[in-house]
Image (spheres, coloured by chain):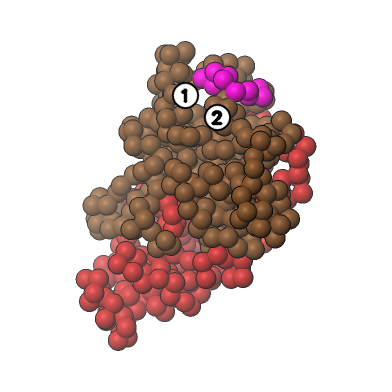
Chain colours: A red, B brown
C-alpha cells in the first residue's frame, strides 16, 4: 500500500482469540475474532496463525500418560532431567536426530524442518500432561484455512502458519513459516538488476519467514495473541507452500 | 500502540532516500527523508537502516584495483569463476573460514557474525570496481545515528542496522540486526509463565532480528528503500547492541 511515496504495511494482532479445542473450525474463529476486533479481513491480507492453535484444532495433542518411552528416550531424559515420555514423542515426530548435546535435542521433523524437540511443546497447552505436535501437513492446514476464510468472507487471503525456531549462530528464536497458502514464500531475485544495473547473483528472499517474524512481534510469546493480520504487503501469489523454504540435503552445509 | 484490543504496528518504507557518499551525515539524511515522506520521527519509533548506506557513509568501500590477492584467494576464485580480489577482501574481513564449499564461502567476520562472503558485497554500489564491507562497529554506528537523530529532532528513537543473511537449513535470506542502539534485541522470557501458568523454559526471542525482518519486507532488495520506520512496537530499552545476538562459541552447535 503506498501513500505518497511511502510503503506502508500494518501488523495487526487480534485480541480475544478463544481457547481452541480439537475439531474447532479455525476459519470461523479467525473471522469472528477479526470482526470483534473491528478488522474485517480483505483480499490481499495475510493471516498469520501460531502453530499451537492449528495443532489444537487438528487434535495434534499427545497425552503423556499414554506414551511408553523407549530405552534411548529414558537414557537421554535421565541425563537431562526431563520427562522420558516427552523425549519419546520428540523421537516419534522426527526422521533424523541432528544433534543431541548438552544444550538441545535438535531433530529433523517428518516434514523436513530442523528444530529443537521436533516442535513438540508443552507451553500454552491447557490439558495438564499433554503436549502439542506440529500439524501433520502444515501447508495443507494453511490451504484449508485460506479456503475456509474465502467461503466465509468472500475474501482471498494468504495464510501463514508459524512457529518459533532457534538458529545455529545467533541467539534467540524467531518466528518462521511452517505452512503457507496463497503466496510465494521464497522470492527468487537472481537475474534481476539492482539500482546500479548490476545483476544480483545470489539473492533469494525468504519473505515467508520475514512475514512470520513480523507477525511474531505482535504475537509475543505468552500465548495471548495467536492470530495476526498483515495488511498492505504486496505478495506474489503462489502455491509452493512452506516446503519451498526447506533446503535440500545436497545444498545444505550442515548435513 | 493499541486501538481497542488490537496491537497495531506500522512498517513505513521511506522513498527517495538519496545516494550516500563517504562522510555524509546519515542522521540528517534520515530526518530529511522522513520529513519529505510526511513522516516526522517520534520518540519510540525504530529506525531500520540497510547496512549498505551506513557502510557508504563510513567510507567502508574497497576499490578492487587496489587489492593484491593472496595465493589462496587466487586458487579459490579460479575454482568459482569469480574475482580473486573480491575473495581477498572477504578473507581480510574474516577471522575464521567456516565453510568453503561449492555453494558458498561462509566466514566469521571480525565482529563475530557468520555469513556468506563476510558481508562483502558488490550490489548497489555505484562506483564500478568497488565493493562494500560491513561497518567496522555496527553497534557504534547505530548509537551514533540514534544520537544524531536525537540532536536533530529531539526524539528518542531506537536504531537497527540490518543486512540479509542466509541460514543453514532454510532457503533464502532474511534481514537480521547487525547493529542496534536503544533497545534490547534479545528478550529473555525464561522464567515467565504462559497463559496456562506453565513456566516457559527455553524461550529467548530475537526481537532485533524480527524487527529487521519486518523492515526487510518494505526494503525489498533492489536498493531503492534503505530506510524503514517501525512504529508502535513497544520495545524494551537497552544498550546491549547486536552483539548480544551472537551465540558464544561454546553454546554454538556448529563450531
Q: Quadrant of residue B200?
A: bottom left
Q: Tell me whether the residue at label 2 lies in contact with that at label 1, contact meaning CB atoms closer than 8 angstroms.
A: yes
In percent of the image, x 57 and y 51: which residue is there? B116
Q: Which residue is mark 2?
A: B54
Which chain hosts label 1? Answer: B
Q: How many discs mark residues in the rendered view?
A: 2
Type of secondary structure dominating the magenta stretch: loop
- Structural crowding at the residue carrying mark 1, measured as other residues with C-alpha within 10 Å and reported as few (<14), some (14–19) or many (≥20): many
Q: CA distance from mark 2 to mark 1?
A: 9 Å
Q: Nearer the viewer, residue A34 or B206?
A: B206
Residue B44 appears left or right of B104: left
Q: Nearer the viewer, residue B193 or A194?
A: A194
Q: Can residue B26 be seen?
A: yes
Split into 4 quadrants, where in the image is the N terminus of chain A?
top right
Q: Can residue A210 be seen?
A: no
Specify whether residue A3 is painted magenta. no
State whether discs 2 and 1 lie on one chain: yes
Which chain hosts label 2? Answer: B
Residue A150 appears left or right of B30: right
Residue B193 appears left or right of A4: left
Q: Position of residue B134 (x, y in %)?
A: 54, 38
**What segment carries the magenta color?**
B17-27
Instruction: State which tag comes first along the sequence, 2 or 1.
Output: 2
Q: Which residue is mark 1?
A: B145
In percent of the image, x 67 and y 53: which residue is there? B74
In percent of the image, x 51 and y 55: which residue is there? B97
In percent of the image, x 37 and y 30: which residue is there? B182
Q: Position of residue A100 (x, y in %)?
A: 36, 72
Specify whether residue B26 is painted magenta. yes
Q: Nearer the viewer, residue A136 or A18?
A: A136
Amino acid at each position: 500500500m503506498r501513500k505518497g511515496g511511502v510503503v506502508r504495511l500494518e501488523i495487526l494482532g487480534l485480541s480475544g482469540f478463544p481457547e481452541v479445542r480439537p475439531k474447532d473450525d479455525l476459519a470461523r474463529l479467525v473471522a469472528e475474532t477479526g470482526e470483534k476486533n473491528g478488522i474485517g479481513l480483505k483480499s490481499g491480507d495475510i493471516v498469520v496463525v501460531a502453530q499451537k492453535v492449528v495443532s489444537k484444532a487438528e487434535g495434534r495433542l499427545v497425552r503423556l500418560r499414554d506414551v511408553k518411552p523407549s530405552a534411548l528416550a529414558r537414557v537421554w531424559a535421565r541425563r537431562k532431567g526431563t520427562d522420558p515420555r516427552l523425549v519419546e514423542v520428540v523421537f516419534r515426530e522426527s526422521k533424523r536426530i541432528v544433534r543431541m548435546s548438552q544444550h538441545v535435542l535438535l531433530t529433523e521433523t517428518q516434514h523436513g524442518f530442523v528444530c529443537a524437540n521436533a516442535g513438540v511443546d508443552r507451553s500454552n497447552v491447557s490439558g495438564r500432561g499433554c503436549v502439542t505436535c506440529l500439524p501433520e501437513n502444515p501447508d495443507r492446514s494453511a490451504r484449508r484455512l485460506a479456503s475456509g476464510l474465502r467461503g466465509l468472507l468472500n475474501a482471498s487471503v494468504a495464510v501463514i502458519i508459524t512457529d518459533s525456531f532457534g538458529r545455529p549462530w545467533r541467539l534467540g528464536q524467531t518466528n518462521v513459516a511452517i505452512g503457507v497458502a496463497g503466496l510465494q514464500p521464497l522470492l527468487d531475485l537472481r537475474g534481476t538488476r539492482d539500482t546500479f544495473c548490476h545483476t544480483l547473483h545470489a539473492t533469494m528472499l525468504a519473505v515467508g519467514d520475514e512475514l512470520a517474524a513480523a507477525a511474531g512481534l505482535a504475537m509475543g510469546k505468552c500465548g495471548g495473541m495467536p492470530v495476526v493480520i498483515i495488511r498492505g504487503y504486496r505478495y506474489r501469489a503462489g502455491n509452493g507452500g512452506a516446503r519451498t523454504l526447506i533446503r535440500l540435503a545436497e545444498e545444505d552445509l550442515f548435513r
